[in-house]
Amino acid sequence: MTFEHFKELTNLMINHHKNMRAIHDLGVDLYGAFEENELLINRLWERILTEYGLDWFTWFMYEKNYIEDGIGLPDLTATDQGKPICEDLKGLYEYLVKNNYFKIPVEDAKTGN
C-alpha cells in the first residue's frame, strides 16, 4: 500500500465522519444505522495492519481525533525513544512501514511494486 492509497482510505473515513456529523447536527441520529459499516471498516483494517499497527492507527484516528478534521489534536503526542512520531498522517504511515505493521506489501510509490 502506497502512502497515496493510505491517504485515500483515511480521507474516505474522514469524509464519512463529517457527513455523519453534519446529519447529526441537523437532529438526525444515524450512527446506529451505520454500525455495520464501522464494523466492516474495522475488520478490513484488521486484515491490513498487524495488532500493533491497528493500535497505532486507531489511536491516531480516534484518540488523537484525526478523523474529526484531518488534523487531529496537536497537543496529543507520541514518542519513540524520545523522538516525536505519528505527528501527521505521513508520519503515521512512515511509522507503520518502519515497524512492519502492514500485513500487506507496501508498494514503492515510484514503481508501484
Image (spheres, rainbow, N blue to C red):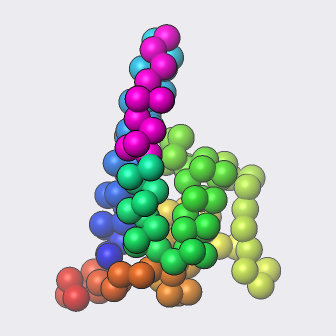
The residue closer to the viewer here, 105 or 77, is: 105
Where residue 12 sits in the image (x, y, percent)?
Answer: 34, 48
Residue sitting at the far top: 27
Q: Quadrant of residue 16?
A: top left
* As drawn, 44 above or below 97: above
* As drawn, 110 above or below 49: below
Residue at the location (61% across, 67% down)? 55
Where residue 45 sits in the image (x, y, percent)?
Answer: 43, 64
Where residue 83 sits in the image (x, y, percent)?
Answer: 73, 79
Q: Assess whether residue 6 is covered by the magenta stretch.
A: no
The count of marks equals 0
Direction from residue 59 to residue 93 in the image, left or right: left
Residue at the location (40% across, 71% down)? 47
Quarter in which the N terminus is drawn:
bottom left
The residue closer to the viewer here, 83 or 14, is: 14
Q: Assess whether residue 29 is covered by the magenta stretch.
A: yes
* As drawn, 25 above or below 52: above
Residue sitting at the far right: 82
Residue bounds of the magenta highlight? 27-38
Q: Quadrant of residue 17?
A: top left
> Is residue 14 shown to the viewer in this render?
no
Dominant secondary structure of the residues highlighted in magenta in the image: helix
> Is residue 3 shown to the viewer in this render?
yes
Residue at the location (30% across, 66% down)? 5
Direction from residue 14 to residue 80 in the image, left or right: right
